[in-house]
Image: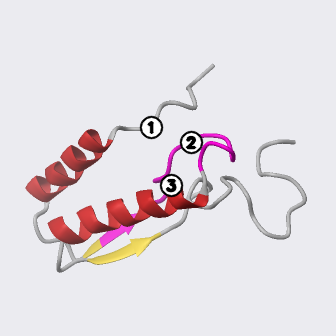
Amino acid sequence: MYGNFRCDAPWVLVKSAISAMRDFEPDPDIILWTGDSSAHGTPSEVDFDYVLSAERTLSTYLRKYFPNALILPVLGNHDSSPPDYFPGRTKFFGTG
């Protein structure tokens, strides 16, 4: 096994990482936000309200620390609700 579903970073680590980003590059032109920002759990554990809250919180941190940057979000497979669900597919992604 290479990982664990419960491997997500706590918010204190996320805030620390964004603060460190600012220390390295205080005024970037562009930030490519590569997604999978929400928790990695089952559809019953990670509902729409949680996903929206996580995305909103991270957006707020990025905007606070980098007010002049163009932020380009790229959604990951855990940035939807339910996770891994893509319209038009008959199964959840990764389940066979």
Kindly identify the residue that appears in the image at 61 percent across and 61 percent down. Answer: 80
- Side (left or right) of 16 relative to 96: left
Residues at marks 2 and 1 touching, judged by CB atoms closer than 8 Å: yes
Instruction: Describe the colour scheme in one phrase.
Output: secondary structure
The spot of residue 31 in percent (x, y) is 31, 69
Label 2 neighbourhood size at 10 Å, few (<14), some (14-19), many (20+)? some
Q: Which range is magenta? A: 31-46
Residue identifier under label 3: 50
Report how far apart the C-alphas of labels 3 and 1 lie in the structure. Answer: 14 Å
Marks 2 and 1 sit apart, C-alpha to C-alpha, by 7 Å
- Sequence-wise first label, 3 or 2: 2
Quarter of the figure with residue 87: bottom right
**Location of residue 1 by image quarter:** top right
Q: Label 3 to label 2, Cα distance in Å?
A: 11 Å
37 is within the stretch colored magenta: yes
Q: Nearer the viewer, mark 3 or mark 1?
A: 3
Q: On screen, 63 above or below 11?
A: below
